Image (cartoon, rainbow, N blue to C red):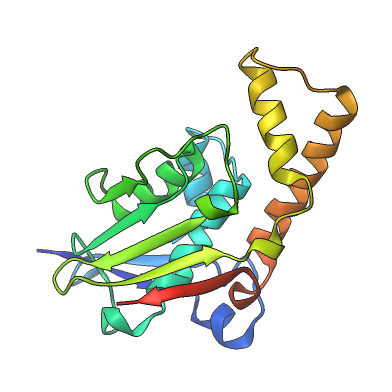
Amino acid sequence: MIAGILLLGALALSTGVASAEDNNLSEQITPEELLTITIEDTGKYHGEGVIEICPCVASAFRSTLQAFSEDLWNGTPHRGDVKINSGHPSDGHVMTFEYILGSTEDLTIDEGADIVNITADNYVYTSTRKSTNDSVTIRVKEEIFPERFFELRTKCKLAKMEKGDVKKEEKKAFTLLWEELKEKLMYKPVDYLFEDVNKS
């Protein structure tokens, strides 16, 4: 029996107000069984037992809330009938999408996506209904990202790989920008964060 996926983010979408209660994803495992997934659940999966919510987990989870609210699902998306393509190759994105889908096979990552040199163009996600081939592409609005976020992120990544240097002040600045982005992605209304690129 194909499992269904139901998004319980309707309140957040309709009122424009996000809260912990609104950030719930419910998945119908069988016609009789409904499993509720919270952003904390995906964070725990990402943190391998410890809740670890980074900007990538928040973006992946809440973009799915937005994508699953679209009409193409005829109400309830079904597990096994959904595939997601992500432009971002991070563990946070990959593990969140895999947890939601209950599958590694229904997730693809853009070919050539570079974990070091990330830009706003990587925060693009396409959810497809496999039975009809209808899809919706959601992206994070470019203005959401703090100034210098990507520049400092790249410098910190390269330094961690021992392929470059980053000043202490730059590392501190990046940590603050990282936290700022995470807070936006977790708590701002979805229509403030995301835009539909296309529906097909």
**Left or right: 134, with 188 as reference point:** left
Q: Farthest residue in the top direction?
A: 162
Residue plotted at (57% across, 70% down): 194
Image quarter in which the C terminus is found? bottom left
Residue in front for this viewpoint, 114 or 78 = 114
Residue plotted at (66% across, 19% down): 160
The x and y percentages for residue 189 are 65, 74
Figure check: 113 above or below 18: above
Residue 17 shows in this picture: yes
**Left or right: 107, with 138 as reference point:** left
Residue plotted at (34% across, 54% down): 85
The x and y percentages for residue 4 are 24, 68
Residue in front for this viewpoint, 126 or 28 = 126
**Left or right: 192, with 73 as reference point:** right
Figure check: 136 above or below 101: below
Residue plotted at (66% across, 33% down): 154
The x and y percentages for residue 117 are 58, 36
Image quarter in which the N terminus is found? bottom left
Number of marks present in the image shown: 0
Residue in front for this viewpoint, 38 or 159 = 159
**Left or right: 172, with 112 as reference point:** right
The x and y percentages for residue 180 are 77, 52
Figure check: 196 above or below 36: below
Q: Farthest residue in the right direction?
A: 169
Residue 34 shows in this picture: no
